[in-house]
Amino acid sequence: MALDLHKRILSAEVQSSKAGSQVIVAGWAAEVKSLGKIAFVKLRDREGYLQLVTTNSKLIAQISKLTNESVIIASGKVQKSKAKAGGNELELKEFEILSEAEPKLPIDMTGKIQTDLSKRLDWRVLDLRQQQHGVVFKIQSKLVEGAIEWLAKNNFMITFTPCLLGIPSESGSEMFELPYFNKKAFLRQDPQLHRQLAVISGNEKIVDIGTSWRAELSHTPRHLTEHRTLAIEAGFINDEYDVMKIEEQLIAAMISKVLKECKSELKLFPNASLSAPKLPFPVLEFPEVYKILEKAGHKEHKIDPEAEKILAKHVKEKYKSDFFFLNRFPFAEKPFYVMRNDKEPEYARSTDLIYRGVELSSGGQREHRYNKLVENIKAKNMNPRLVEWFTQFFRYGACPHGGFCIGIERITMQFLGLDNIREAVLFPRDTERLTP
C-alpha cells in the first residue's frame, strides 16, 4: 500500500484544515458519480461525509469502475467546495481500493427507498452505515459516558455482577435455562440481589453496567429478550427520596453530555425533544395516583401503558415536565426485597421514573432489616430456601440502601423518539432473532 493509513485524518478534520494542505483520508465510497470530464466520490467515515472530486482523466476512469460501499484510502488537496452546502472538499490526487464491494447491495443505502425494519436488521452492518441509523449509537455512547463521568465524580465504583445464576432470583417463569456441567443454570433477568450484596459488603456506592435476559414472549416495539442496563445502588440512605435525587441528577448529567457533544446528530431525529430538565422531578404517590387516573376515565387500578400516558399528560400540564416519579407502589405488586412503609405496610418505598409516557427505570429503597426481609418473603408465599443464599448475609449487619436500574436501549429510544427499541440496539435479540 503506497498511502499510509497512519497519516489518515477524519472528514471532520478536513473541514477545519487550511485550503491547499495535502491530506490522506479513508472510508467507504457511499456514492460514486462519473460525469464525463469530472467525477465525484462521497466518502463516509465515522465523523460524516467528505466529497472527493477530480478532473484527471486517469482517475475518472478508475472511479467509473468503483462500486458503492467499497473501502478506499485517498490523498489530495483541501479546497473550498463549490457545492451549495459549502465547507471543504478534497481535490483527488490518488486512491487505492482496500476492499471492493459487490456491485449489487442487498438493501438500499441512499435513503431514497424505505426498507422495512426486519430486512434492515437482516443486513444490520450495512444498515448502520446510514447516518441516521448509525449515529444512534454515538448518542447512546455519550449518554453512558455522561453517566459514568457524573458517577465517578460522586464516588460510585464500577462493579461487575454475575450473568449466570444457580437459582432463579424471583421466578423462573421468564428466565432462560441452560446446562451448566451437571447442573442447571439461569441467565439473569436482573442482578438486583447481587448489587445489594455488593453494597452491604461495604462498597456502599456502586454502578453496574451489563446485560440481562428475559424469556418473555412479547412482540411489542418496547421488548427485547436481551438488553443492557445501567444500575446504581447506594448505601446509607434515609429513604427512597435519596434514591430519586441521585437518579434525577444522573439523568440531567446524561442529557447535558448529549446536548453538548451531539448537537448536529440530534437534528437527524425530528421526534427528539431533549432539553436540560428542571430539577427536582415531580413525584406522584399512591393512592393519589388512582384519583388522577379515575378523573381521566381510567377506572382500573393498574399502571399500564395507557395509565403512564395519562399521568404524563397530567404532569406536563401541571408541572411543565417530561419527567416524573411514581412512588409508594402497592407492596402486593412489588418483589420481596423492597422496603414496605412501616406506617402503611400496604405500600412500598418503590419508585418508577417516567419520561414522556414511558417507564425508564424502576427502583427505590430495599429492605435491609433481616426480620422484615423474612416477613416479606412469607407475605409473597415464597420458599425461603430459594433466596437463603441472599438473605443469610443480612443477619450480619446491612446498611440502609436503595437504587434503580435504567434500560440503556429504552432510554435511547425515548430520548430520540424512535419507533422501535430494536433501532437502539446494535444487534437486537428478540423472540425471533438470533442473527446477525
Image (cartoon, grey):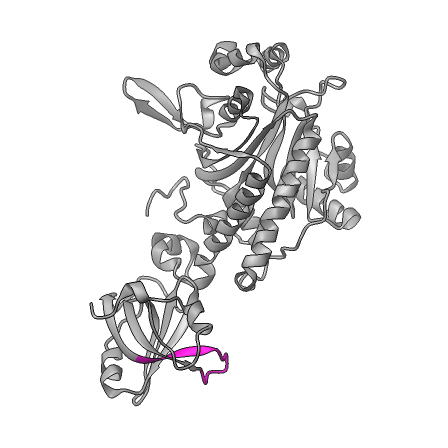
Q: Quadrant of the N terminus?
A: bottom left
| Residue 268 visible to the viewer | yes
| Residue 303 visible to the viewer | no
Q: Camera-side residue: 380 or 13?
A: 13
Q: Quadrant of residue 211?
A: top left
Q: Is residue 300 magenta?
A: no
Q: Camera-side residue: 411 or 235?
A: 235
- Which residues fall within the magenta stretch? 81-92
The total of numbered circles placed on residues is 0
In the figure, 265 relative to 56: above or below?
above
- Image location of residue 103, percent across then percent down: 25, 69
- Image location of residue 107, percent across then percent down: 35, 62
- Image location of residue 29, percent across then percent down: 32, 70
Q: Camera-side residue: 18 or 267?
A: 18
Relative horizontal placement of residue 180, taking residue 428 as reference (left or right): left
In the figure, 367 relative to 20: above or below?
above
Which residue is depicted at the point 59% across and 33% down? 404
- Image location of residue 266, percent across then percent down: 55, 60
Q: Residue furthest left?
A: 1
In the figure, 163 relative to 397: above or below?
below
In the figure, 342 relative to 132: above or below?
above
Q: Quadrant of residue 25?
A: bottom left
Q: Quadrant of residue 284?
A: top right
Relative horizontal placement of residue 76, taking residue 358 as reference (left or right): left
